[in-house]
Amino acid sequence: MQPIMTTILAIESSCDDTSAAVLRDDCLLSNVIASQKVHEQYGGVVPELASRAHQQNIIPVVDAAIRQAGIGKEDIDAVGFTRGPGLLGSLLVGVSFAKSFATALGVPLIEVNHLQAHVLSHFIQPHPLTPLRLERGADSTGNPLPSPIGEGLGVRPQFPFICLLVSGGHTQILLLRDHFDIECLGTTIDDAAGEAIDKAAKIMDLGYPGGPVIDRLAKEGDADAFHFATPHIEGYNYSFSGIKTSFLYFLRDRLKEEPDFIERHKADLCASIQKTIVSFLLKKVERAALDHHVRQVAIAGGVSANSYLRSELQRICHKHHWQALVPPFQFCTDNAAMVGIAAYFKYQRGEFADISLPPYTRSN
Ligand code: KG4
Ligand code: ZN
């Protein structure tokens, strides 16, 4: 007899990506992401425009996810959705859609915390029988993604492990003892690492979001060309606002003497600020992994797409005989597949959401 499998439709709309995914148990069948280009001209996400774009995208994105999965609506056993944290106007679109869709199908709802979803993305498995219909995509700089389902998938993390969650809104070192037994060992006391990278890019007039551009330009630069001081912060906590300010003041002084300084040293500046931020991040992650005697170290969130962070993590893990868990690119930035895997684990535990639950904008 065939084992009973669970099919979950997942929705993500917490910021500026509208995404829907279908999972059968922990295996991914489809993951459709509509990114919103409208914010680029404003140098950051405009909440009202994000909300409107989600309204336009949500139905076509869900429709595509169901079609690409090769299932019918009647096959869906539950609807998972990101309840928070995020932008209220953005969350409301996904939350309302999920509630209406689940009600119409007569299936349970599962609420998911966006940060937990980023971390749990490491548990997503490729489906052994169904050919994956994920299309080869491109990252935000236009570079093709390495494969529809990239490297790293299929290695199931073993508890306990450490995860560095690093995005435009969050920077945390987490210790996972179980899927939902997650201890925050350290966090940023001001800006997130992605925010600092985006601000450095903005100072150099590289557009928004700047992270992928810095990553690309840094490949041609000398990471030791310039030095930026990192603050001394207790324990596993971080602070990034000082790094951003020292970058700004450094450039202000140099530009006085050399007005085209940024243009002439762009690649070196990108490589140097990237190295400063990544080294600061990983120094504390390495300490946390040693102190907690783990054998696996993961990264998650938008900044985990950074090629220098990925290779440096691998180098450090190799040195200690740890396993580096590096997510495929499509699971780094916001996506519904990660919401689906978190919803699947909650489904197994029978944790369903009431239709009256409102979205929340902050973690606590
Ligand atoms: O997780 P995410 O999509 O959204 C948030 O929840 O914030 O992360 C977005 C962040 C932005 O700061 C973006 O610049 C950064 O991830 N990012 C990168 C790269 N790709 C995205 N930062 C550095 N290198 C990259 N390749
Ligand atoms: Zn995110």
Image (cartoon, grey):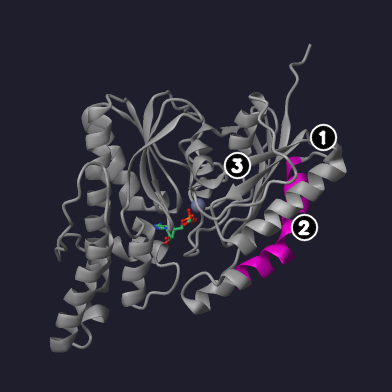
Q: Earlier in the sequence, mark 1 or mark 3?
A: 1
Q: Nearer the viewer, residue 117 or 146?
A: 117
Q: Earlier in the sequence, mark 1 or mark 2?
A: 2
Instruction: Report x, y in % for residue 144.
Output: 51, 56
The residue to which callout 3 is attached is: 112
Residue farthest toward the top in the current orientation of the protein: 1
Residue type (three-letter) at the residue carrying disc 3: Val
User: Relative to 74, is 154 on the left or the right?
Assistant: left
Disc 1 residue crowd, few under 14, some 14–19, many 20+, Cα 10 Å:
few
The residue to which callout 1 is attached is: 75
Q: Is residue 267 above or below residue 149?
A: below
Which quarter is ligand 1 in? bottom left
Disc 3 residue crowd, few under 14, some 14–19, many 20+, Cα 10 Å:
many
- Would you say residue 65 sits in the magenta stretch? yes
The magenta-colored residue range is 49-69
Q: Main secondary structure of the magenta part?
A: helix
Q: Nearer the viewer, residue 97 or 300?
A: 97
Look at 73% across and 24% down and name the residue there.
5
Q: Nearer the viewer, residue 221 or 353?
A: 353
Looking at the image, is mark 3 or mark 2 nearer the viewer?
Answer: 3
Q: Nearer the viewer, residue 174 or 332?
A: 174
Look at 85% across and 41% down and name the residue there.
105
Mark number for residue 59?
2
Mark number for residue 124?
none
Are the residues flagged by discs 1 and 2 in contact, CB closer than 8 Å?
no
Determine the secondary structure under disc 2. helix
Residue type (three-letter) at the residue carrying disc 1: Asp
Determine if the C-beta at disc 2 is less than 8 A from ligand 1: no
Determine if the C-beta at disc 3 is less than 8 A from ligand 2: no
Residue 92 quadrant: bottom right
Instruction: Report x, y in % for residue 77.
Output: 78, 33
Instruction: Report x, y in % for residue 217.
Output: 33, 66
